[in-house]
Amino acid sequence: MASAFLPPADPLYQQVIVFLYEEARLLDNWRLEEWLALLADDIVYVMPVRVTREKNQGSEFDWNLYHFEENLASLKTRIKRWETQFAWGENPPPRTRRFLSSILVERGDRDDELKVTSSLLLIRNRGDAPEVSFLSAERQDVIRQTSDGLRLARRLILPDQSVLGLESLFIL
Amino acid sequence: MAGTVDKMRLRDGTPLKDLVRIDEGRIAARVFTDPEIYELELERIFLRNWVAVAHETEIPHPGDYVTRWIGEDPVIVLRDKDGNIHILLNSCSHRGVEVCRASRGNVSQLVCPYHGFRYKLDGELASIPSHKEAYDGRLDKTKFNLHRARVGIYGGLIFGTWDAQAPPLEEYLSDMRWYLDLLLNRTEGGVEVVGAPHRWVVDANWKTGVDNFIGDGLHTFMAHRFAVELGVLPEDPLIGWFGYHISVGKGHGLAMVGAPERIPLPPYLGLPQELWPHFERSLTPEQRRVFEKTGTIHGSVFPNLSLLNTTTISTEEGVPRVPFLTLRVWIPRGPHRMEILSWFLVEKEGPDWYKDASRKNYERTFGMTGTFEEDDTDVWISLTRANRGLYARRHQVFNYEMGLHREPRPQTEWPGPGAAYYGDYCEANQRCFFQRWLECMTEV
Ligand code: FES
Ligand SMILES: [Fe+2]
């Protein structure tokens, strides 16, 4: 069976990987204005609430309430808050590390778009506590090719936890 | 007396009543961090009071259920074939395995996965496999139903208690109903929960949330200072002051905050005009009078339910602010940890644009990833962390004096029940909560 996924040797696949790594690095280093520049103007950025359900009782994702239901303007508001001296939950800043794996790329619905899925492990540590908290999730992205390079046009985050173990999370 | 335990004292001899000195406005730090106190709370608070677990609209159809908590005990909240709601301990009467393993769903009966005991939706034991042979026909099946909590419903909100002696819910809520009506019954259809609640765990004592929501107006200027920096809240240290701080009694309290005269507020928190005629029909003139001049309502119902109805900020530049309503329970998970379970609710009659905008504002400011939410949880975690040590537990005492010498306003000025103080920089409600807390802790 021929796979619809681009092979790792495909230059487009490599471009996408570098894009995602770079994006994760900007977030891990709190270079949030630069991160914003990687988003398409019409970005849709969502993470639904997950609930534990019995098998065959429908999707575990609740498409009525979200952890994130964002567009460019609302993401900007989140980041503007972070830039003040008074985002107490981020001051002192948490240390975050985003691990990405299982990146699969296929052609999108539009000629200039790619559908990208990946596994995310976010590790978060704060203050002098040796413990870390974490969030793992599947990401389903739409990445658009533009004359300025790749841009994130859509991100759907499907968390692996129904009760989140992070004390706060203003951006993922 | 030798051999007997003095239930009025902690093991180190400290009388419980010394921890909470309402008349002086002093509360010992260990109330928030001592494991011994926490254990007592599970018994004296969570086994004896009405605890909110769900809203009727979460389980609209026969067989619908959600799993929740009363204290540290897991319960199933479900609707039976006749539409009646039951709260059952999620523990099989045979040997204790959970009979419900998901957090929501629909069932026609409850079947234990261990040995197959089956229960009806009201918790009655229906059948046991090989019952005759296994028990030689001698087991009295009527004695092995699931444990059932008493159920009380107000404004669609479902409460449970294990205490057969607890007063009926109406009496327990008492005057708080007048205010709950402003939130839950302001339209004929009432409010509905949208989706599944946000749930997350933070390392803070459960009372930090109750205490903040019941009456902490002062923290707005500092903890949520980012909103001032962004120019969405005025640079005025009195920003959270302008309104009434109402100690309702029985441990319940709330604040209805407005704005100074010079800043015009939209009526009814800025709720859409389409809803105003409903208020006319559903609320009394006195309720409307106070509701009309309000921009924010925050409060708590004893022991661990809180409520918030406000507009916070515009989360998208150029898009007007829309109010939202959230209820949440602060579920105890040990002395230094709680689960926050937070619902978003909206009027059934609300126009779609409002429902959408209201939901987003909630998600972005007071949901799990909300910007305001994070400010609050951060300081609660901090105060829990800072007061766990033995020295702090013995000697640190928190100050709850704010408004201690203030007089409540007369009925002509404030027509609602309870003692209404002007100015939400006040700790009368917190004292009201801890007074009830102390009563429970010493009622043995
Ligand atoms: S534990 Fe439930 S049937 Fe035995
Ligand atoms: Fe707050």
Image: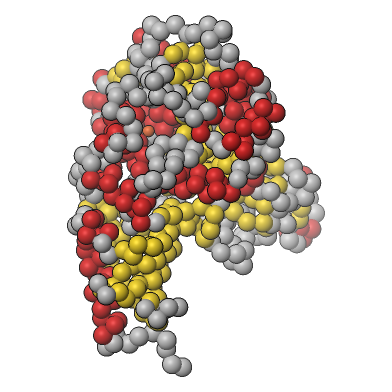
**Residue A60 appears at what percent x and percent y?**
53, 61
**Residue B218 appears at what percent x and percent y?**
34, 23
Q: For residue B156, what is the image quadrant?
A: top right
Q: Is residue B246 visible?
A: yes
Q: Residue at x 43, y 59 (%)?
A: A46
Q: Residue at x 56, y 51 (%)?
A: B195
Q: For residue B114, what is the image quadrant?
A: bottom right
In this view, the residue in front, B143 or B419, is: B419
A160 relative to B194, above or below: below
In this view, the residue in front, A14 or B108, is: A14
What coloring was used for the rendering? Answer: secondary structure
Q: Is residue B98 visible?
A: no
B115 relative to B18, above or below: below
Q: Residue at x 25, y 25 (%)?
A: B392
**Residue A168 appears at what percent x and percent y?**
34, 47
Q: Left or right: where does residue A143 sit relative to residue B137?
A: left
Quarter of the image with the N terminus of chain B is top left
A39 relative to B427, above or below: below
Extreme residue in the bottom direction? A1
**Residue B199 appears at what percent x and percent y?**
46, 47
Q: Left or right: where does residue B24 sit relative to residue B275?
A: left
B402 relative to B187, above or below: above
Q: Left or right: where does residue B304 sit relative to residue A29?
A: right
Q: How many marks?
A: 0
Q: Residue at x 49, y 8 (%)?
A: B409
